[in-house]
Image (tube, rainbow, N blue to C red):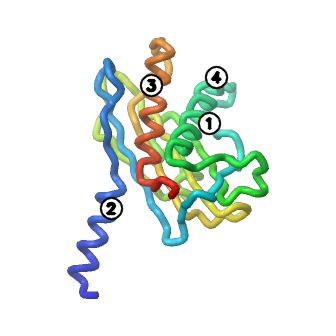
Amino acid sequence: MNLRLASLLSTLLLIGACTSSPQPEGEPPIQASAVSVTMPGFTVDADTTLAWRSDIIWVDDPEGRFERRGMLLQNALQEEFARKGLAFHADPAAATYDVVAIAMLGPVSGHPEVEEVFRLYPALQKSSDGYRRGSVVVAIAPRGTKNIVWRGALEMFTDPQAMQEVSVREARVRWGAQQLLASIPAAR
């Protein structure tokens, strides 16, 4: 394969990893950036099952203030996996893949321990109306291994102090989960 064709294919794969979809109705515009990387060994079919390696990990929350939001996010991710036909196995030891998710206020680039594992850098250009960046990273590995076969990251502007209606916050979280997992194919 010549160098020009290889370069074109690489570019198309990178463009395909960036996602966008309609925002929740009645919402102010959401600025978000999602990136993902799929390794050749990642396959899904009707028998593929998942298991959480742990509950979502929220970085920079020593007092547990965002625990409820973390669970909301984990549930939204699990629902999006289910929408793609991927079920979570009742027995984690019998699942095909382990899933780990990490959430944080601020960009991924401010957390070296996360950068080292995920090596993904979604980027938003500038803050919007006083909102701060929030980031979520997800990794999938064959059960019991650390060999990541899919990883994705989402960065979006958020305001953890805003007292929005619960339905608005939940819609934003579901939308973010869709953006983050958009490159994962549906199970067949």
- Residue at the disc numbered 2: 14
| Crowd around label 2: few <14 · some 14–19 · many ≥20 (10 Å) | few
In this view, which residue lies farthest toward the bottom? 1
Chain-order first, disc 4 or disc 2: 2
The residue nearer to you, when weighing 62 against 46, is: 46
The residue nearer to you, when weighing 7 against 110, is: 7
Residue 177 on image: x %, y %: 48, 39
- Residue at the disc numbered 1: 58
Residue drawn at x 63%, y 30% as measured from the top left: 71
Q: CA distance from mark 4 to mark 3?
A: 20 Å
The residue nearer to you, when weighing 155 against 13, is: 13
Residue drawn at x 54%, y 48% as measured from the top left: 85
Give the label, 3 or 1, closer to the camera.
3
Q: CA distance from mark 4 to mark 2?
A: 36 Å
Q: CA distance from mark 2 to mark 3?
A: 27 Å
**Which kind of residue does numbered mark 3 sit on?**
Ala
**Which kind of residue does numbered mark 4 sit on?**
Arg
Q: Secondary structure at mark 4?
A: loop
Give the label, 2 or 1, closer to the camera.
2
Q: CA distance from mark 1 to mark 4?
A: 10 Å
**Which kind of residue does numbered mark 2 sit on?**
Leu
Q: Secondary structure at mark 3?
A: helix
- Residue at the disc numbered 4: 65
Chain-order first, disc 4 or disc 3: 4
- Residue at the disc numbered 3: 171
Residue 22 on image: x %, y %: 30, 34
Chain-order first, disc 3 or disc 1: 1
Q: Quadrant of residue 103?
A: top right
Which labelled disc corresponds to residue 169?
Answer: none
Residue drawn at x 69%, y 50% as measured from the top left: 51
Give the label, 4 or 2, closer to the camera.
2
Q: CA distance from mark 2 to mark 1?
A: 28 Å
